[in-house]
Image (tube, rainbow, N blue to C red):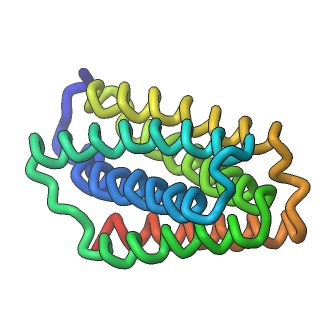
Amino acid sequence: MTRWRPGDRRPDTASMIRVDQAGEYGATRIYAGQLAVMRRNSPEAKLIARMAAQEERHLKRFNVLMSERRVRPTALQPLWNVAGFALGAATALMSEHAALACTDAVETEIDRHYADQLADIGENDPELAADILEFQAEELEHRDTAREAGAANAVGYPILTAAIRAGCRVAIELSKRI
């Protein structure tokens, strides 16, 4: 562990845990919305169900960290509940490829977000860094799985993914603070 010295910038791990918990919660809601609309036995629904189970595990871990470290949740949780489910349902209603494009976009942005967090943490919080590193690898697996399953075949893929990524960036910034 690196020793802190006066003048050093300490990572805001409480904010990191808050935003990561909110993000994992949002991901579970996106997948719930998609699964509510998709044909249950479609190959895409099976992929999404597997990814949703991993997101549930990530959420449980961040819930534990919030409790252990006394981190307050974002006040925006009710909004992420509705917005996540609506995004998932809307993309699944568009098409199965659009649902996969949503996963592609979200996980691309989360990869960038987790990489930024890991750089900020450095050696200051090995426990949190290990969790983030593990979850980042799984998020990248979700993105790659979505791409392999045809995410780029969604109508309007570049516009759809750009809009979803922008929404993710806004959600991240708001959840850090509110």
- Name the spot of residue 17 as percent of width and height, x first: 28, 49
Task: Mark yes or no: residue 62 visible.
Answer: yes
The residue sitting at 30% across, 33% down in the picture is 128
- Name the spot of residue 173 as percent of width and height, x first: 43, 68
Q: Total number of numbered labels?
A: 0
Residue 148 figure quarter? top right
The residue sitting at 41% across, 35% down in the picture is 132
Left or right of residue 126, residue 135 in this image: right
Q: Nearer the viewer, residue 39 or 65?
A: 39
Q: State the quadrant of the N terminus.
A: top left
The residue sitting at 53% across, 65% down in the picture is 33
Left or right of residue 158, residue 165 in this image: left
Q: Nearer the viewer, residue 65 or 84?
A: 84
Left or right of residue 45, residue 160 in this image: right
Q: Nearer the viewer, residue 98 or 2?
A: 98
From the viewer's perspective, is residue 51 above or below residue 86? above
Residue found at the very far top of the displayed protein: 1
- Name the spot of residue 19 as percent of width and height, x first: 35, 58
From the viewer's perspective, is residue 61 above or below residue 93? above
Q: State the quadrant of the C terminus.
A: bottom left
The residue sitting at 28% across, 37% down in the picture is 61
From the viewer's perspective, is residue 15 above or below residue 166? above
Task: Mark yes or no: residue 9 visible.
Answer: no
Q: Nearer the viewer, residue 148 or 5?
A: 148
Residue 75 figure quarter? bottom left
